[in-house]
Image (spheres, rainbow, N blue to C red):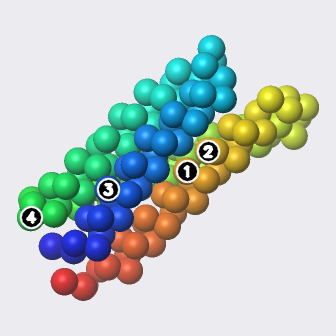
Amino acid sequence: MNHKLSKILIIYGAFLILAGVAGFLSNPEKAKTALISGGTFGTLSIVWGVLALRQVGWSLKAGLITTGFLTFIFAWRSAATWQAYIGGNTEKLFAAFLISSMLAASILVLFAFFKSRGQK
């Protein structure tokens, strides 16, 4: 099992939770989904990382699938949020940066997965 990748998943999960909290705090009336999704997928990524540290064989595959899914979602949401900002909704600037940072983190985690292929 790849301990480095397990720890990366745990850190990634913590980052997603913090990003969800930041999104919620930036606009508590409208950003409840940021808290829910950041908390849910952050916790899930932490669980995959912890299970991988405990040598549960399928956990890294689950982490890869989850991260791939999130990369797609963050790319879509980032593009939509930047379009809203460029279209004149200046309230979307913080959300655009936050979602873009979540996309960047997801891409980095995917690179870590692919870099670790074949390593023990």
Alpha carbon distance from label 2 to label 1: 5 Å
Name the residue that disc number 3 marks: 10
Asked if marks 1 and 4 touch (Cβ < 8 Å), the reply is no
Name the residue that disc number 4 marks: 55
Identify the residue at image location x=73%, y=39%. 94
Alpha carbon distance from label 4 to label 2: 32 Å
Callout 1 environment at 10 Å: few (<14), some (14 to 19), or many (20+)?
Answer: many
Image quadrant occupied by the N terminus: bottom left
Callout 3 environment at 10 Å: few (<14), some (14 to 19), or many (20+)?
Answer: many
Up/down of 3 relative to 48, above or below:
below
Alpha carbon distance from label 1 to label 3: 14 Å
Amino acid under disc 2: Ile
Amino acid under disc 3: Ile
Residue 66: x %, y % from top left: 35, 49
Residue located farthest toward the top when viewing the structure as drawn: 29
Image quadrant occupied by the C terminus: bottom left
Residue toward you, 40 or 82: 40
**Residue 102's disc number:** 1
Question: In terms of secondary structure, where does tag 1 sit?
Answer: helix
N-terminal label among 4 and 3: 3
Identify the residue at image location x=43%, y=66%. 110
Residue located farthest toward the right when viewing the structure as drawn: 88
Name the residue that disc number 2 marks: 99
Asked if marks 2 and 1 touch (Cβ < 8 Å), the reply is yes
Amino acid under disc 1: Met
Q: Nearer the observer, disc 1 or disc 3?
A: 3
Alpha carbon distance from label 4 to label 3: 15 Å
